[in-house]
Image (cartoon, grey):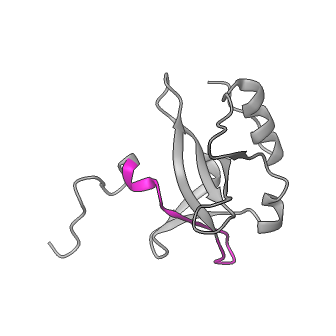
Amino acid sequence: MADTLERTETHRLISSDKVEGTKVYNPQNEKLGTIANVMIDKKSGKSEYAVMEFGGLFGLGSDHYPIPWDMLTYDTDKGGYVVDIPKDKLTGAPRYARDATPDYTDEYGRSVFGYYGLRYPML
């Protein structure tokens, strides 16, 4: 079979270790950053956030930006995710230093989702 998939992914599923490091673009094909990690709800198993690393140079001075998972669309041609967020909107977006992970409380979730004009899901 010419189009074989690795064991870590299927036609609709991908292993979490393959998501980390994946590039994130906006619809204008500008690279915004890369996925640092994924935040998954312990009870439902649903991915709630992709935490994107953005800014800095070679990872130095970059911040982490939680992006609601449902805002991302995987683009097979790019081999990465596309999110409809202009670069200038990221300057005021909720973020944190890589060594200062916040508590992902409901209050924090409402502030992140609210920034992007989304309703925080009550799971």
> In x, y percent, where is residue 97?
69, 46
Q: Quadrant of residue 24?
A: bottom right
> Which quadrant of the figure contains the C terminus?
top right
Q: Which residues are magenta?
A: 17-31
Image position of 105 with respect to 81: above or below: above
Whether residue 13 appears in this view of the structure is: no
Q: Examine the structure image and report whether residue 19 is included in the region drawn in magenta.
A: yes
Q: Quadrant of residue 33?
A: bottom right
Q: Give me the residue at 68% from left, 33% from top.
A: 102
> In x, y percent, where is residue 118?
77, 43
Towards the viewer: 71 or 53: 53
> In x, y percent, where is residue 40?
51, 34
**Which residue is the extreme one toward the top?**
43
> Which quadrant of the figure contains the N terminus?
bottom left
Towards the viewer: 52 or 57: 57
Q: Give me the residue at 71% from left, 63% from top.
A: 84
Image position of 102 with respect to 4: above or below: above
Question: Does residue 21 appear to the left or right of 25 in the view shown?
Answer: left
Image position of 95 with respect to 23: above or below: above
Question: Does residue 80 appear to the left or right of 106 in the view shown?
Answer: left
Q: Give me the residue at 75% from left, 31% from top.
A: 108
> In x, y percent, where is residue 7?
22, 54
Q: Give me the residue at 21% from left, 67% from top.
A: 4
Q: Examine the structure image and report whether residue 7 is included in the region drawn in magenta.
A: no
Whether residue 70 appears in this view of the structure is: yes
**Which residue is the extreme one toward the front?**
60
Count of marks overlaid on the render: 0
